[in-house]
Amino acid sequence: MNPLLAPFETAPFSKIKNEHFKPAFLQAMEDARKEINAITENNEEPTFENTIEALEFTGQQLDRISSIFFNLNSAETNEEIQKIAQEVSPLLSEFSNDITLNEELFKRIKKVFDNQSNLKLSVEQSTLLEKKYKSFSRNGANLPEDKKKRLREIDTELSKLKLKFGENVLAETNKFELHLTDESDLDGLPEGEKEAAAQLATAKDKEGWLITLDYPSYIPFMKYAKNRQLRKELSMAFGSKGFHNDELDNQENVLRIANLRHERANLLGYETHAHFVLEERMAETPEKVKEFLNELLQKAKPAAEKEFEQLSTFAKEVDGLEHLEKWDASYYSEKLKQKLFDLDDEKLKPYFKLENVINGVFKVAEKLFDLKFEEVFDVEKYHEEVKTYKVYDLDDNYISLFYADFHPRKGKRGGAWMTSYRPQFQLDGRNFRPHISNVCNFTRSTPSKPSLLTFNEVTTLFHEFGHGLHGMLANTVYPSLSGTSVFWDFVELPSQIMENWCYEKEALELFAHHYQSGELIPMEMVTKIKESATFQEGMQTLRQLSFGLLDMAWHGKDPTDINDVKQFEVNAFEGTQLYPETAETCMSTAFSHIFQGGYSSGYYSYKWAEVLDADAFAYFKENGIFNKEIGSKFKDNVLSKGGTENPMILYKRFRGQEPKVEALLERAGLLELKR
């Protein structure tokens, strides 16, 4: 019996073999088609229950198989899984199109939609009805047959291209190694980082030290290594992923994806891909997004230019450097930060042992949202390093299962993300609780030290855990409205607001203890962390805005005339460039967020959500960062509600007002530059 087709409560990882996936997909798609047919062949008049609700609960087994498979393809992949992904992705795309282009099904949905004023629907039911109707109308249900056929072709090709893009980036990351045998090449690197580099070399049967493009290896080297030539070599390798005119090159993939998205939007009656995407976002239009990004750019640019000048002057004073390049950025920023604040990441790390930070984020969740986390050892895992927890409320009601996977591996893509193996929903009188996962790439323990996090890694852990809480605390009826199934520019609010607690004395006291002595982090360090929080904020803001503007450049206009990816990118970055341009590097060819992930026309949402989170956290600050009443309001109106209502309505119900951009500018120290 195929374990993926048998009933299971938690993912049966130990029983799943790669050869199980494709047959399971095929069978689950066939079963889901039968469920769809049962709806379309129903002779009764279409109702909310027999059409909309029935459709919502079709294909549940297929959804779970997809979750398991694509999560493994991100966190524990291999060539065989990647090959299966290339085979099943077009099939899934075709299956999805079979549903959205099913005329009989759409007729029934449209009948219910047109009759909604006569139905006594709850807010959540109304949202579901609108979402279902739009998912058809926005995906071609109203198109003539020839255009439907073209839409299917586009979607099939896009699903393959996005996978290929991601595989190339991963292969480029794994391919590059900086193998060092002279210890002087590691001058400046802290002992722990040297030890980690030696460990990487030993694991590959090599002498000396190994530096890779994985973040825990790449970032410390760029930040501390004195050898400028080696920093340049590493920076060039990192910045040129997918840009070598070889079999892993992504330039054609980028152009093809952009053009197909544009053609698809045009087919559906939209001016550009961005117009299509933003119709379902809080921002609503490309014009509004560009206005938002340019307003922040206007506020941040003077500060960024001042900071860049300060950094250039500092580099010249310290090392006689005439021209600051991209590979100098982290190195001199870290040195300047240490000079200004006497705050060294290496001095902070002993206070941030991974296990303590995990306990800390759990305690914050307990104080704010009445949650308890209990590590369990009887839940199957896809890798021995994964930790599993059961989450309860203070009355011992089961809330969620939580998987946590923290370290880089060969088969794991870079970065950090939250995902789920099962969403929360209610069916047949049972509230099915969610299975949520956080995946990160943090520095491993070494023979002499446990895993000690940089402060940046601490905020990353809190960030992803915020997404996790959005999934765990979901309490809706329908799976497609549950947890993080919200407007994309609202989805970062729960994650970004959690980062704020990392800067607060009251929160740090819960977990920031020295891993050897148990001593609490000295309060002068906490003060310095807070003071340094806005260090180079202008430059950081400019960097984020540049990514958002690049995204809008690719997707907010007709891309058919673009033939030079690099030149197009240079033009898009024009108003945000501080460092000299390097001809050998290209951001777009490894910009996985927008060409592989779900952020196309949506990268601006990080900044958009920062406005929300700064405004929301200001509310906590006014009333106490562990104020139970406000914590409950956030849980009840934001975290548990998913996508059941318009996000601005939910936000105002929590906050009592619309968010103000001033809260972000004030926190970022940019308010004095406001015109």
Image (tube, rainbow, N blue to C red):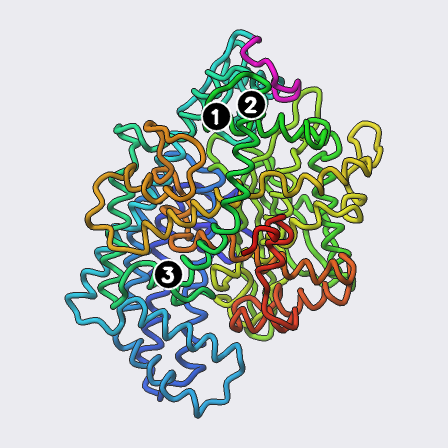
Provide residue 249's location: percent of width, then percent of height. Answer: 29, 33
Residue at 48% x, 42% y: name it: 543
Q: Are marks 3 and 1 in contact (CB under 8 Å)?
A: no
20 vs 520, left or right, is: left
* Residue where numbered disc 2 is placed: 315
Total residue callouts: 3
303 vs 326, left or right, is: right
On residue 324, which mark appears? 1
Q: Are marks 2 and 1 in contact (CB under 8 Å)?
A: yes
6 vs 251, left or right, is: right
Is residue 65 visible in the rendered image? The answer is no
Distance between the Cα atoms at labels 2 and 1? 7 Å
Instruction: Specify start and end residues of the magenta stretch as a single range.
Output: 183-193
The prevailing secondary structure element of the residues shown in magenta is helix
Residue at 52% x, 34% y: name it: 308
> Mark 3 falls on what kind of element?
helix
Between 187 and 549, the residue placed more toward the observer is 549
Closer mark to the observer between disc 2 and disc 3: 2
* Residue where numbered disc 3 is placed: 286
> Mark 1 falls on what kind of element?
loop
Provide residue 40's location: percent of width, then percent of height. Answer: 31, 77
Q: Earlier in the sequence, mark 2 or mark 3?
A: 3
Picture layout, residue 48 above or below residue 248: below
Distance between the Cα atoms at labels 2 and 3? 39 Å
Query: Would residue 185 be counted in the magenta stretch?
Result: yes
